Amino acid sequence: MKKGFLIVLASVLLSGLTAYAIVKTAAPAPAGEQQGVTYSSDGQAVRTVNLSLSDYPDFTYAAETAVNAVVYVKVTIQARQQQQQYIDPFFRFFFGDEGYGGGNRERQGSGSGVIIRPDGYIVTNNHVVSGATKIEVTLNNNKTYEATVIGTDPATDVALIKIDETGLQTVQFADSDKLRLGEWVLAIGSPLGEELRSTITAGIVSAKGRSMPNYDGEFKIESFIQTDAAVNPGNSGGALVNKEGELVGINTAIVSTTGSYTGYSFAVPSNIVKKIVSDLIDFGSVKRAMLGITGGTLTEDLAKKLKVSTPEGVYVSEVVKGGAADKAGIKSEDVILAIDGTRIASMPELQAKVNSYHPGDRATVRVFRGGNTQDLSVEFTDGTVANGTVGSDGTVSFYGAQLRAARDGVEIVSAGNGALARAGGQDGFIIRFVNDQKVSKPQDVIDIAKRSRRSIFIEGVDASGRPGYFGFGKED
């Protein structure tokens, strides 16, 4: 059976309030730290450090500050009968294997959310509310409200919902870029349903800028905070906060082959969340900046080939013609080292940094090329280039997507983030008809679209061979 990951919150229990560490040193303790120094039988100095309650992590302030801003989210979904055998892993996680097939069934699932504004705006995960016909939010004081979806961003698995209330307690955003490895964090949410609402647990930051094994391609942008926290179903969308009670992430997933905690949990960093929800409130959709490259994290072999001192950075394999990187002078085989002074060590870190900008923003990108580093000024775009633009890989641009000829139509190699993707176009979809006219090459698609007065209607099959269709207006 194909492995997958489940979507939950993270926790780990902390035990003990006072401890004594015996540190053997070769020399006397530094000045100012002589108190508590004793000597062993061999004459070496031994320093005794008293980890009293004041020194040991005390999470009471953070817990009491944030707990009332974390809510329980209950969703109702109408599960329609499906002919195919594939079962969406998110749906299976919330509702079980019986959720597909056997006719129309009403199912209920649950998750968590975080109040970010006193007038009722709540952040949660996209997979918690996706497809919901009804959403109910229960506060920590047991008051329940019906919620509406303001907007979602499947690429980061972030969603914004709202209840009709004012004067609510909120959690303040922290700068997730300042998180340090080993820093203590708290996870707050509702593991295993309503009975365990407002559960607070603790863990540490195990890694930053982490990608997860992605078996089904749900997330397009990954730069997760990894914690060593035990998690359970129902905590998706809950808060990950620092010792000051500030939001550093939205708990989203674990990697597990069993469905239970095996040591790895992940949260969307607050800097990404803050930008996404700000766009959803201000514009109704996410205004995502695009650099216009393909590539990957620099490997040791590539670093040796390119004579880069350390295997850190993003190797640029292709540059999208007419994109932001192309206009800035970034070339294939460049290595991106930093953006606006922020070190870039991996592709997830590059994705996270670029995602913090809007189209039209400018940034300085440091690249390594031919043994030297240079700074290039980039103006980010929304990723769309003129329809019909042919890339270096032979694909053709069409409403933000990249097309190429296929055996029985035209394949969407990359759906991108333009009108075609927003209408439902997906990677691997084979376009067979556009406005009822059969197509066999990308230019057919472009020519038919040009002749259309108002809208474009596309028919074909998805990557698994299932028939599908979608449409969009030319002005979209």
Image (cartoon, grey):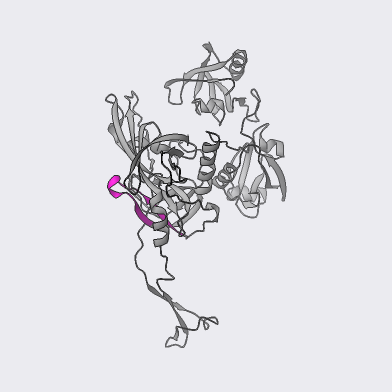
Please provide the residue range marked out in magenta: 184-201
Decide if residue 370 is in sight here: no
Q: In this view, does 253 lie to the left or right of 336?
A: left
> What x and y, as percent, mark residue 163?
41, 39
Residue at x 37% of width, y 72% of height:
18
Residue 157 magenta-highlighted: no
Residue 166, compared with residue 12, is above or below; it is: above
Residue at x 33% of width, y 36% of height:
92
Which of these two is toward me, 180 or 262?
180
Residue 83, compared with residue 119, is above or below; it is: above
Quadrant of residue 398 in the image?
top right
Residue at x 67% of width, y 51% of height:
307
Quadrant of residue 4 in the image?
top left
> How many labels, in total?
0
Residue at the far front: name it. Answer: 167
> What x and y, as percent, mark residue 390?
65, 26
Quadrant into which the C terminus falls: top right
Quadrant into which the N terminus falls: top left
Residue at the far top: name it. Answer: 437
